[in-house]
Image (cartoon, helix red, strand yellow):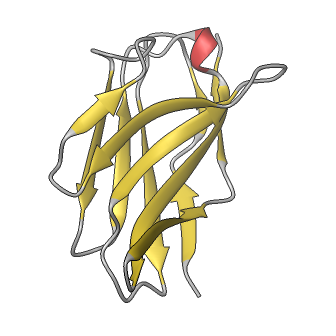
């Protein structure tokens, strides 16, 4: 059974930094895409960053230039380096990963989610 476990959240002052980690266990395949979503109180879930199997990264406009995503395929881990944090970055952060399953002529994605880690940016 695949499990994703996040760590690294917490309370940080505006302008500070945090590094989130997400480690997957029970994995017997390669993930296609790994990434991070967040959900702030009263807001919809937002894709923060993603990184594909070729290490091509995509970022939400709101975090571009401040956040960096990376992955370690050997360890099935994805990281989110968050710098110059702002109060509006306060949210629960969830990591996800997906893989492609091919059955005959059909292919589909299965995604996996972590339980979330809270990030609070406040003075």
Name of the residue lying farthest toward the front:
105
Name of the residue lying farthest toward the right:
42
Looking at the image, which is closer to me, 20 or 99? Answer: 99
Residue 20 picture location, percent across and down: 45, 46
Residue 84 picture location, percent across and down: 39, 14
Give above or below for 68 relative to 88: below
Position of 41 with respect to 84 (left or right) is right
Position of 95 with respect to 44 (left or right) is left
Give above or below for 111 relative to 96: below
Looking at the image, which is closer to me, 41 or 120? Answer: 41
Position of 18 with respect to 41 (left or right) is left
Q: Quadrant of residue 83?
A: top left
The N terminus lies in which quarter of the figure? bottom right
Give above or below for 112 relative to 101: above
- Report the number of discs: 0
Q: Quadrant of residue 27?
A: bottom left
Residue 33 picture location, percent across and down: 36, 55
Give above or below for 78 relative to 120: below
Rendered residue at 39%/54% (across/down): 34
Rendered residue at 48%/67% (across/down): 108
Rendered residue at 43%/54% (across/down): 21
The C terminus lies in which quarter of the figure? top right
Rendered residue at 41%/17% (across/down): 63
Residue 48 picture location, percent across and down: 48, 30
């Amino acid at each position: 059974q695949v499990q994703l476990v996040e760590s690294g959240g917490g309370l940080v002052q505006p302008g500070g930094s945090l590094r989130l980690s997400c480690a997957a266990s029970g994995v017997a395949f390669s993930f296609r895409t790994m990434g991070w979503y967040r959900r702030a109180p009263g807001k919809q879930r937002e894709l923060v960053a993603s990184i594909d199997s070729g290490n091509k990264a995509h970022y939400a406009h709101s975090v571009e230039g401040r956040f960096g995503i990376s992955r370690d395929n050997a360890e099935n881990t994805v990281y989110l380096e968050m710098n110059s944090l702002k109060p509006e970055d306060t949210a629960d952060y969830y990591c996800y990963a997906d893989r492609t399953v091919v059955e005959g002529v059909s292919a589909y994605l299965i995604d996996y989610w972590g339980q979330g880690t809270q990030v609070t940016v406040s003075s």
